[in-house]
């Protein structure tokens, strides 16, 4: 059985680098949507990111008033997602799908998927969710087809059921409960009023991270996704982090 992970458009099927791949789950870097500004690479603390994602749940008592992601899903997603946000060059997004077992009112557990598109902009993390705890197991068992794990989109909501909220999150656009934004904290304000860890920019960038960013930039150039001038400018900016 061939696994289809994105929608049918040629552009969405492109990707630059796989950061993580599980049986059905993935975190990868790919081109931003046409006409949209992409990721601004930013170091994100994975522990803070895990706490931030743990806040998310459905609005209006959806999802049985439970968190969007299970503990296992948070553990699987937070580290590779944080890594990808720090590595994705400008003009790219991070897309992900995370799967886990969910049920209705705690009953009838089924494999479900949550997908999203993530990028940093002006010191803020944007996550646009596509699917939220969508049961794909019944369809997979019934006709042996794995549905498209479509990430979120700036242009439109993928599913009207994907309406989320979180204590420190706000909507990224009016009426878009699928598009949520949370600000990174400054170093002098590392913890919020509840004492939860807030994201802090590391003082230095590791050599391995810089090497990975250079490798991704090379792939972008090979795929003609950046111009020669952009390549030179981005390479210089990456090396300046040494």
Image: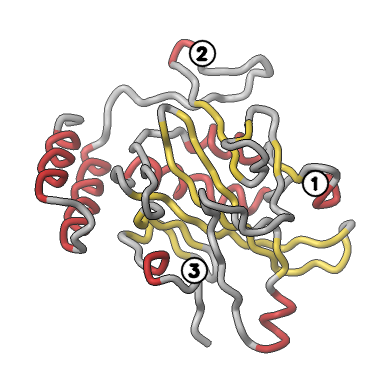
Are the residues flagged by discs 1 and 2 in contact, CB closer than 8 Å?
A: no
Q: Is residue 220 left or right of residue 135?
A: left
Q: Secondary structure at mark 2?
A: helix
Whole-angstrom CA distance, mark 1 to mark 2, is 29 Å
Whole-angstrom CA distance, mark 1 to mark 3, is 27 Å
Which of disc 3 and disc 1 is earlier in sequence? 3
Q: Nearer the viewer, residue 226 or 47?
A: 226
Callout 2: few (<14), some (14-19), or many (20+) C-alpha neighbours within 10 Å? Answer: few
Residue occupied by mark 2 = 189
Residue at the image point whose x is 24% and y is 53% from the top: 216
- Specify the label residue 242 is tagged with: none
Which of disc 2 and disc 3 is earlier in sequence? 3
Viewer-side label of 1, 3? 3
Residue at the image point whose x is 70% and y is 75% from the top: 137
Q: Position of residue 18 (x, y in %)?
A: 37, 61
Q: Is residue 234 left or right of residue 101?
A: left
What is the quadrant of the C terminus in the image?
top left
Q: Is residue 91 left or right of residue 81?
A: left
Residue occupied by mark 1 = 66
Q: Position of residue 91 (x, y in %)?
A: 31, 47
């Amino acid at each position: 059985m061939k696994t289809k992970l994105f929608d049918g458009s040629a552009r969405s099927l492109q990707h630059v680098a796989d950061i993580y791949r599980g049986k059905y789950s993935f975190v990868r870097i790919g081109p931003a949507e046409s006409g949209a500004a992409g990721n601004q690479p930013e170091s994100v603390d994975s522990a803070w990111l895990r706490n931030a994602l743990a806040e998310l749940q459905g609005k209006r008592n959806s999802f049985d008033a439970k968190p969007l992601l299970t503990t296992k899903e948070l553990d699987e997603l937070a580290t590779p997602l944080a890594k990808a946000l720090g590595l994705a060059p400008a003009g790219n997004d991070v897309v992900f799908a995370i799967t886990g077992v969910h049920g209705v009112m705690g009953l009838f557990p089924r494999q479900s998927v949550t997908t999203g598109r993530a990028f940093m902009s002006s010191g803020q993390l944007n996550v646009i969710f596509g699917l939220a705890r969508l049961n794909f197991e019944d369809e997979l068992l019934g006709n042996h087809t794995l549905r498209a794990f479509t990430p979120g989109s700036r242009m439109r909501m993928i599913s009207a059921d994907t309406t989320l909220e979180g204590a420190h999150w706000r909507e990224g656009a009016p009426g878009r409960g699928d598009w949520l934004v949370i600000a990174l904290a400054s170093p002098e304000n590392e913890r919020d009023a509840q004492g939860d860890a807030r994201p802090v920019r590391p003082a230095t960038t590791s050599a391995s991270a810089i090497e990975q960013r250079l490798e991704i930039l090379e792939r972008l150039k090979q795929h003609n996704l950046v111009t020669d001038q952009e390549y030179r400018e981005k390479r210089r900016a990456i090396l300046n982090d040494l």
